[in-house]
Image (spheres, helix red, strand yellow):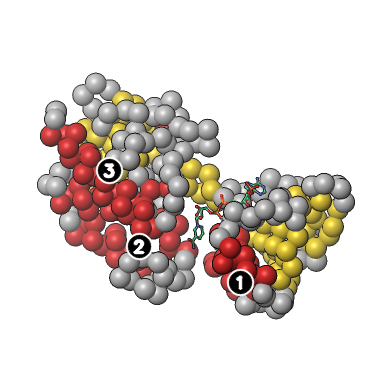
Amino acid sequence: MYDTIIIGGGPAGLTAAIYVRRAGLSALLCEAAVCGGQIINSPEVDNFPARPHVSGWQLAADLQAQAEEFGAEIKYAAVTGLTVGEKSKTVHTSSGDIEGRTVIIAAGASHRMLDCEGAARLYTKGVSVCATCDGAFFRGRETCVVGGGNTAFEDALYLSGLASKVYLVNRRSVFRAEPKLIDALRARENVEILTPYLSHRVFGENRVEGFEIKNAESGEIVSLPVSGVFAAIGMVPATEAFRGAVELDSAGYIVTDEECRTSVPGVFAAGDVRAKSLRQLVTAASDGALAASQAASYLATL
Ligand code: NAP
């Protein structure tokens, strides 16, 4: 039985692994695909303290190497559930069950997909959730970003340096993005901001040939001649496997106190999977450290 099972190999999970091992406890980290989390798709991260202009991929590789150097074991398997017993916790995975005395859930969140006609069929064929990954394919072409948060404005700014024209479409005329990003985008000549518009239909046979949007007030349909549609409409927490095991909020995020303790003693949550106000690399790392330290304190009481 492991002292701590960490679910998720993003910055929160990897930092938790470093701290658990530094506390002299055994740690198994379960990751479904590749360690690093969302940052592996960021060409440049410039808001992590003391690592300006580092690539997300490099930062992820360094974090994983550091966790492994401290002796964290990594198992590549998808976690499908969690059962909390009196003496131990069982993490169910695609390759069998694992027993732990404590669990840190750092499963992250994934991009919310557009739910209009054609979006799923044309996903990866012009519909994307990652401007920095796919933007270069749209050099000199017209593209559209859907959303009104920081991600949508950052994506539109990035794309405006590549595409001939960028439309930013949001369902409301009020934006969640920071004013400085909104002002920066408004200053770009090849950008048009359209609100309040809902996604109606992405069309094209084998690739995106256009995008229809519907005015939320008048119902008027407008067809945009774009070859790329980037969804930046927020995230969905990866908590389905934990529904019923720990308390979730109405949006599906895990409810914790400030010390990353969930509703279940011995189960902690860290990073984007947790209900909180700021989801950033630095707060994910901070959560990982806090959750690990709380796991160590909990184990000391057993
Ligand atoms: P977000 O702030 O939650 O914004 C999501 C946007 O998508 C909102 O405009 C929302 O509209 C819209 N939306 C949500 N569901 C939709 C749907 N089904 N159909 C159409 N539109 C929909 O998400 P985010 O921009 O990904 O940012 C997530 C977090 O990361 C935020 O805390 C953000 O500040 C942070 N972040 C920070 C930075 C930075 O500091 N540089 C960069 C990126 C992200 P409504 O407003 O109507 O709900």
> Does the residue at mark 3 contact the one at mark 1 (Cβ under 8 Å)?
no
- Specify the amino acid type for callout 1: Ala
Instruction: Report crowding for label 1: few under 14, some 14 to 19, many 20 or more residues within 10 A (C-alpha).
Output: few
Q: Earlier in the sequence, mark 2 or mark 3?
A: 2
Residue 185: horizontal and vertical position, in percent? 64, 70
Q: Is residue 52 found left or right of 180 in the rendered image?
A: left
Please state which of the two labelled residues, at mark 2 or mark 3, is closer to the viewer. 3
Classify 10 Å Cα crowding around label 3: few (below 14), some (14-19), many (20 and above).
many
Distance from mark 1 CB to nearest ligand 1 atom below 8 Å? no
Residue for point 22% across, 39% down: 295
Q: Is residue 3 above or below residue 132?
A: above
Q: Which residue is mark 3?
A: 291
Q: Position of residue 96 (x, y in %)?
A: 33, 35
Task: Classify residue 32 as left or right of residue 196.
Answer: left
Q: Secondary structure at mark 3?
A: helix
Tell me which amino acid carries mark 2: Ala
The answer for how far apart the CA atoms under marks 2 and 1 are is 29 Å
Query: Closest to the observer: 204 or 231?
Result: 231
Q: Position of residue 128 (x, y in %)?
A: 62, 59
Q: Nearer the viewer, mark 3 or mark 1?
A: 1
Queried on whether the Cβ of the residue with tag 3 lies below 8 angstroms from ligand 1, the answer reads no
